[in-house]
Image: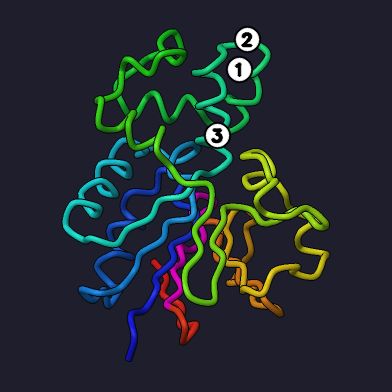
Amino acid sequence: MGARIIAIGDIHGCYKKLEHLLNRLPIQKNDSIVLLGDYIGRGSSSKQVISDIIALQKRHKRVTCLLGNHENLLLEYVKSPEEVLIPYLRQQGIESFVESYGEKDLSHLHDLSFMPEEHVHFLKTLALYHVEQDYFFVHAGLMPGLPFEKHTAMEFCEVRDAFLESEVEIDKTVVFGHTPFEMPFVAKNKIGIDTGAVYGNLLTAVVLPEVRFYHA
């Protein structure tokens, strides 16, 4: 058998579920691991989630971490700390993110000075997408009619209905998160694995190419 790919859906600070899922996954030396973004926000343990993912990167040579809409909005605020973004960050549960680092308010959110340098580097080096074998991995999906190389970070991270309701326009199966489903979503050339872990449902991974799901 050739190397497999293991993709993991939206974690949102659910450290215990991530820990249980990693313990259940049959990770082998040559497997690729792709995390689809949204590591932070809403859940209570964003700091621990990032620490665990960094540890995974150090012990496994093939780990790719993608940018999610929660990380993207935070980084947009860091680049240009416009107060108009604060309500949107609050809607995404940014308070739980800063509280996981021991912060009491959002006063240092603009420079992330409350975070270890290694964690800041992790956020700033997240990939927009990943292509491997017959799969295109992205946080949210692809905009219909727009070549993927012309997508912005916001489009990769935010698209929802337009992508779900359209045909895939590349010769790959798109593996995505962002849109929570009760169970994994499988359609022609699409696999959605955000199963709402932070809302009390499951954290999901898929092993490819056999399309076998694991949950925690």
Quarter occupied by residue 177: bottom right
Quarter occupied by residue 90: top right
Marks 1 and 2 close (CB-CB < 8 Å) = yes
- Residue at 65%, 50% in the rendered image: 149
* Residue lying furthest left: 59
- Asked whether 127 or 162 is in front, the reply is 127
Does residue 200 sit above or below 126 in this rendering? below
- Asked whether 56 or 145 is in front, the reply is 145
Is residue 200 within the magenta segment? Answer: yes
In the picture, measured across the screen, residue 147 lies left or right of residue 212, that is right
Instruction: Name the amino acid, label 2.
Output: Glu
How far apart marks 1 and 2 lie (CA) works out to 5 Å
Q: Which residue is mark 1?
A: 86
Image disc number at residue 72: 3
- Asked whether 6 or 127 is in front, the reply is 127
How far apart marks 1 and 3 lie (CA) works out to 13 Å
How far apart marks 3 and 2 lie (CA) works out to 16 Å
Image disc number at residue 83: 2
Q: Tell me residue 180's x, y (percent).
A: 62, 58
- Residue at 43%, 44% in the rendered image: 39
Q: Tell me residue 65's x, y (percent).
A: 40, 51
Instruction: Name the amino acid, label 1.
Output: Ile
The span picked out in magenta is: 197-207
> Quick one: SS at disc 1?
helix
